[in-house]
Image (cartoon, helix red, strand yellow):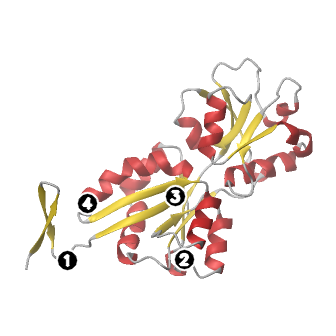
Amino acid sequence: MASLLLAIGCKVMTVPANAQTATLLIAAAASLQDALEELDPLFESANRGITVNYNFAASGPLQQQIEQGAPVDLFISAASRQMDALQGQNLVVANTRRNLLTNNLVLVVPRNSNLGLTGFRQLTNANVRRISLGEPRSVPAGQYAEEVFRNLGILEQLRPKFVYGNSVRNVLGTVESGNADAGVVYTTDARVSDQVRQVATAPSNLHSAIVYPMAVITASQNQPAARTYAQFLTSSPAQAVFRRYGFGIAE
């Protein structure tokens, strides 16, 4: 039989007989949301029969959901730590793991800020009262931020000013609303908001390398389709979209 007819609502779609049919759940770091949502129609139009759903959140909670048996097919973390933990429990398919993207850590302020901040050290100034960052135990961007402050020798001085967010997008929203004088997010987050200004980029030697590893989940019932999706994310069209959002491509 050359093709298979799938009825969807009132539409009938023809799918090649050798095509994969699956509904994938992708658990992805919150900072990936805009890029992956833009890529979704491109993937699904090229892979008729595979539908992709997403769960965007901080990498730590996503790791915990996978450990608790959530029906995830592919995980994309914003740090190696969460993926290492899952791999140590044999919860990811080891030969599918690869580093997908890189990013930079930046300091942002509300667009109308008049504090004149131009660097991370100035966060110790008395007129800076609230600094938003991700909760370091679960949000990789918060972990990287604390590393920067620790390496600058100002972490303990700043700690009373911290306002923690449950994801990097939550941190961004806190700065956008003016509920924090400054915040630490990724380059890619700063670029999607017209309500904040990026005032400094953290030197890469002050924090761990920011990489986004991905891997197929061992318990996935759709491993072939998940592998197809992972391969798509490394394609030239996908990489072009990632670059436009400010990501680097991991080597």
Residue at disc 1, secondary structure: loop
Q: CA distance from mark 4 to mark 3?
A: 21 Å
Q: Residues within 10 Å of mark 3 (few under 14, many from 20)?
A: many
Residue at point 65% right, 42% down? 185
Q: Amino acid at mark 4?
A: Ala
Give the numbered dot on residue 46. 4
Pointers 4 and 3 in contact (C-beta within 8 Å)? no
Mark nearer the N terminus (4 vs 3)? 3
Q: Amino acid at mark 3?
A: Ala
**Which residue does the numbered mark 1 point to in the structure image?**
18
How far across and down, in percent of the image, does residue 73 sit? 45, 70
Mark nearer the N terminus (3 vs 1)? 1
Q: CA distance from mark 3 to mark 1?
A: 28 Å
How far across and down, in percent of the image, does residue 157 sit? 92, 40
Q: CA distance from mark 2 to mark 4?
A: 26 Å
**Which residue does the numbered mark 3 point to in the structure image?**
28
Residue at point 46% right, 70% down? 71
- Observer-nearest residue: 79 or 222? 222
**Which residue does the numbered mark 2 point to in the structure image?**
92
Q: CA distance from mark 3 to mark 2?
A: 14 Å
